[in-house]
Amino acid sequence: MRQGRLIATGAMLAFCLFALWQSLLLSLTDRLGPGPGFFPFWLALIGIVLAIALLFSMWREPQPAAQDASIEEVRILPHGWGALRCLAIIGLLAAVTVAMELVGFRLAMLVFNAALVIALGERRWWIIFVFAVLGSFGVYYLFTTWLDVLLPTGQFGI
Amino acid sequence: MEALGHLLHGFAAALTPGYLLYAFVGCMLGTLIGVLPGLGPAAGTAILIPLTFSLDATGAIIMLCAIYYGAMYGGTITSVLINVPGEAASVVTCIDGHQMAKQGRAGSALGIAAIGSFVGGTLATVALVAVAMPLASLALKFGPAEFFALMVAGLCLVVGLAGNNMLAALLMTVIGLLFAMIGVDPVRGAPRFTFGVEELYDGIGFVPVVMGLFGVAELLLAAEKRQTHMVEAELKSWMPTGAECRQSVGAIGRGTVVGFVLGLIPGVGAIVPTFMAYVLEKRVSKTPERFGKGAIEGVASAETANNAYANASMVPLLALGIPSSPTIAVLMGAFIVNGITPGPFLFKEQPELVWTVIASFFVGNVLLLILNLPLVGLWAKLLKIPFSYMCAGVLIFCVIGAYGLKQSLFDVWVMLGFGILGYLLRKLDFPIAPAILALILGPMMERSLRTTLEISGGSFAIFLDRPVALGLLAVPVIVIGFLLFKPRSLAPLRESDIE
């Protein structure tokens, strides 16, 4: 946990430093008053101070015993089946985003729904089929026809 | 009197079949979201935004507000039946509610929760009617300096509630504000932090961000854990007995006051009023030993405070344009998506909309009471939906919501990225609420500050010349200073206080 928080705070410090550099490329003030870089510059500066203060406070915290630390580290990232389920959700979401552009919402979502419920433990094929069809073609019809929401049709117009 | 006239006009609009239907659908969906463990009101409101894309602004806001209230009540059902709060504010309800369920009194617990929610929500809306307009009139006298100070105060109060995690909360606020800087500069129109990416010229979309941080992150957290199984609780009757109602009258009254007062303070969060109302009830009770063992006053006080808070938290949003919690920030995002800027000008420029929405709060409370008492058994059955289907269903809505607003797949990637980020930040105990509030308030804060400095010729001394702004800027200094240097005797409320 402590190590994870240190890394995260370090990443935020890097983000604030980057924002500070980028804001310096914009004008901080001009003849009308504060320029586009003014607010982000001060925010980034405050962020840097806060990140350093947070890193310092974490560094001062008493370190847990080695045995406890190992237990804590395991808990931060998912493991076992939990990790696989999380990876399935992230991977399938990324895949459906790419696929929607190519084959459209309906086909991409049909495969996404089926793959996701299988990955999360469902094995009854007829339920998977009904859910996948309703969650893709049914949802597409509901949103485009009834709710006037445009959804991607892909390169083949389906 | 003027407010009453406006409210009557609001009722005339809110009771038209179309708006009644939106409120009804919102209450149903909200309760459904609240019932499903792991999806809180913020996530629920965020993922259901796409349903309102085709509605007019008033209808969209009515439906989203109804989803919010419905979710606040829906969480009670799981708290009572399976000892798992559907949303954070229902944690306290678990204590006595689940004990009552174990004693075969689940119906009484859910019944008194529905009645308390109705009374708390309705009385808080009456108070909202009385308070919101004078507050908005006062805020109309504010200049950009006062608005900047007000937003700083609102953000710092949210940060102050982070307790020991205050440095992290402050840092998250700054990170949220920096993300809000992406896009075209609101004053001069110059692109900032866009790196030539066309999609970033409009800034990072609020809807994909909240869908990622709440919807996707919540699912990732839930996917990691083992699923809970429902304990079959007996639902003999959904009405509490006369004696139980009499026992709960005082608790409902006190819960309403606690919920309303705390709802007016930005950053308090939904869990604090329920916690405070419960502790207060235990302290005033002649038989405090019953608390934790199935005392109906424990359920009544917490649930009443919960809904009174939900209605009262609309006051800072409608009158001042300040979201007091992540869910209210999502609602504010929905206002903005529909071309409405919440704040004092709303009462002046769009009175029909604002009073129709307020009238719909009353309607929504009645609908929730009608829906929740007889349909408790049906909601309980929804707990049996397997996680795999719930997860896929929520993700469909997230994808549509992120894509649908601008028809941009880039926003779906933004949602996924923020989902992973939200998951990691939650695991590492970094508070997300300040970042969400900062993201939505960022452009307005910048515009107010820069306009103020343009008026003053670049001098910050303008804040010293404006007593209201100075007073508001003193609030965060006092709050943060107090929290940093508070005496040890003033330790925050702990869970042991309610055990």
Image (tube, grey):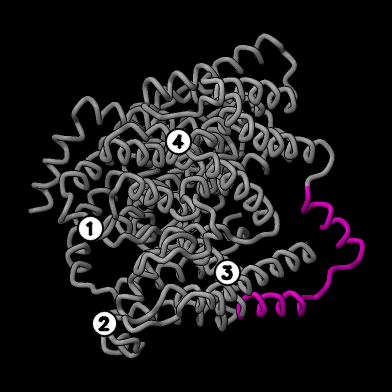
Residue range of the region highlighted in magenta in the rendering: A49-77
The reply to whether label 4 and label 3 mark residues of one chain is: yes
- CA gap, disc 4 and disc 3: 38 Å
Is A74 a magenta residue? yes
Label 1 crowd (10 A; few <14 / some 14-19 / many >=20): many
Label 4 or label 3, whichever comes before in sequence order? 3
| Residue B227 makes an appearance in the image | yes
- CA gap, disc 3 and disc 1: 29 Å
Residue B163: numbered disc: 3
- CA gap, disc 3 and disc 2: 37 Å
Q: Which amino acid does label 3 sit on?
A: Gly
Instruction: Identify the element where label 1 is drawn.
Output: helix
Location of residue B294 by image quarter: top right
Is A114 a magenta residue? no
Residue, disc 4: B404
Label 4 crowd (10 A; few <14 / some 14-19 / many >=20): many
Label 4 or label 2, whichever comes before in sequence order? 4
Please state if B110 lies on the left or on the right of B425 as rendered.
left
Instruction: Identify the element where label 4 is drawn.
Output: helix
In this view, the residue in front, A53 or B408, is B408
Q: Subunit of mark 4?
A: B
Find residue A115 and report its horizontal and vertical position in percent. 70, 24
Find residue B325 and report its horizontal and vertical position in percent. 44, 56
Q: Return the residue found at the far top.
A: A126
Residue, disc 1: B132
B287 vs B167: above or below? above
Label 2 crowd (10 A; few <14 / some 14-19 / many >=20): some
